[in-house]
Amino acid sequence: MAISKLVGLVPPIELFFWVAPLGRAVRYFFAAFTLSSLRSFSYKKFKVACLWMGPESFHLVALAAVAVAIALTIQCVLELQKYQAEELSGAVISIGLLREIGPLTVSLAWCARVAARIAGEAQAYTTDNGDKNFAQQFVLTNYLAALTMSIPLGAYGLVIGFITGALVAPLLGVSSTSEFLESARGGIQMRDMVVYFVKLILVNPTVGFFAGCAAGTTTIHSHNAAPSNAVTATFIVGFFANLIVTYAAYLAR
């Protein structure tokens, strides 16, 4: 039986093929900070990467943040109304957005976009230049662009989410926008903010970028499969990476 048929019939084997390039992703990560990579850093390529990762992604982040905030606000307010505690919805929604919902939805959606494009570029780059040149000349420049753009996008998505929740909550029964914001302010802890930005600025962009690199350089026979494999790996590894951060922040002693 051909390998492709075996992969399609046995889900555990298919999962193995998705995560098998993890070792290569780790190798690229360490190769990005070698002296030769630093010497090959291109500010021109850095600006181009920042453009499509940042400004061209604003609409994705905004629309995703609005949709997620509205859905979360509806669910929280309606459930809290059963206990006559809808005035606490600001705290509940803010905690949900900061700790898990924002990183697992808006952030990973953006990282999946990055991973898909990086996979395509990595596949084309290694075909023309080889794996060694890819590690030295491509990885660091684009990785720094991903980390740089995650900072404004993370803050932007957070603000959009809070504003949306504050505007929608009074339509569902919360007394006022100011009450919603006051409740949110009381519920947010510094640890929640740290967890949010660690996930959005460090963990998720790293997962998405190197998933794209590994998928692009290991998917040889099909130009269409590399972005799909990169997105799949981004979500699988991203979910578990976020879980590890949550455990370390809230449960580890």
Image: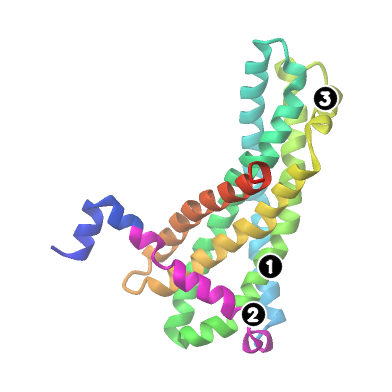
- Check contact, mark 1 vs mark 3: CB within 8 A: no
Residue underneath mark 1: 50
Give how far apart the Cα atoms at labels 1 and 2 are.
19 Å
Earlier in the chain: of badge 1 and badge 3, it is 1
Give how far apart the Cα atoms at labels 1 and 3 are.
35 Å
Q: Residue 2, position in %: x, y? A: 16, 65
Q: Which amino acid does label 2 sit on?
A: Phe
Give how far apart the Cα atoms at labels 3 and 2 are.
47 Å
Residue underneath mark 2: 33
Q: Residue 53, position in %: x, y? A: 64, 62
Q: Is residue 31 magenta?
A: yes
Earlier in the chain: of badge 3 and badge 2, it is 2
Q: Main secondary structure of the magenta part?
A: helix
Relative to residue 212, is residue 74 depicted above or below? above
Q: What residue type is labelled 1?
A: Cys
How crowded is the residue under tag 3: few (<14 C-alpha within 10 Å), some, or many (20+)? some
In this rendering, the label closer to the viewer, 3 or 2? 2
| Range drawn in magenta | 16-39
Q: Residue 90, position in %: x, y? A: 76, 27
How crowded is the residue under tag 2: few (<14 C-alpha within 10 Å), some, or many (20+)? some
Q: Nearer the viewer, residue 164 or 100?
A: 100
Earlier in the chain: of badge 1 and badge 2, it is 2
Name the residue at 70% across, 17% down: 172
Q: Residue 48, position in %: x, y? A: 66, 72
Residue underneath mark 3: 177
Q: SS at mark 1?
A: helix
On the rendered structure, is 85 left or right of 113? right
Identify the image quadrant of the C terminus: top right
